[in-house]
Amino acid sequence: MSSALVRRDAFGQVKRSFCTATIESDRTWLLSNYPKIEASVRRVLVAAVQNLPPGQEDRRLALAAMYAPTDDDHGRVALDRFKAIKASEVQRAIAAKIARIAEG
């Protein structure tokens, strides 16, 4: 089921966009579960306020220490993005650049 949403562009022209059933079901789920989501977010914020140091730089360092991506993390992201390239000639060119970098 989709419902048209009407909006106007910068020139005042009417533009229609559509909400898909998936978006509507997500919206329904959010509306019915927002108290649980809000409670979870509040717990996370309280824990952060109670456990993080007060200074901005100290807080930044503590947050960075909680999750600093490893080289494996970076490699997985790079590989995923490489796989997303559709054009084989672009993939070959990027692979050649990576090979040159790897050789030193």
Image (cartoon, helix red, strand yellow):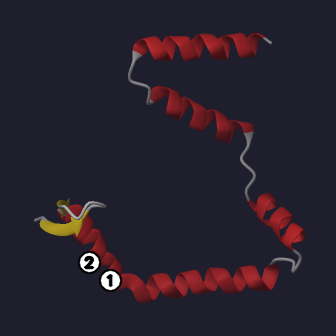
Residue 94, quarter of picture: top right
The type of residue carrying mark 2 is Thr
17 vs 33, left or right, is left
| Left/right of residue 37 with respect to residue 14 in the rendered view | right
Q: Quadrant of residue 59?
A: bottom right
**Residue under the image location 73 percent in, 79 percent down:** 48
Check disc 1 and give the amino acid type.
Leu
Q: Residues within 10 Å of mark 1 (few under 14, many from 20)?
A: few
Residue that carries the numbered disc 2 in the rendered image:
28
> In this rendering, would 68 be left or right of 21?
right
| Front residue of this view, candidates 54 and 72 | 54
Q: In the displayed structure, would residue 70 be above or below residue 80?
A: below
User: In the picture shown, does residue 56 fall above or below 43?
Assistant: above
Pointers 2 and 1 in contact (C-beta within 8 Å): yes
Seen from this angle, which residue lies furthest left?
Answer: 1
Quarter holding the C terminus is: top right
Residue that carries the numbered disc 1 in the rendered image? 31
Left or right, 84 with reference to 51 = left
Per the model, the C-alpha gap separating discs 2 and 1 is 5 Å
Which residue lies at the image location 40% right of the left edge and 84% below the top edge?
A: 34
Judged from the image, the secondary structure of the residue bearing numbered disc 1 is helix
Residue 8 x/y as whole percent = 23, 66
Name the element at disc 2. helix
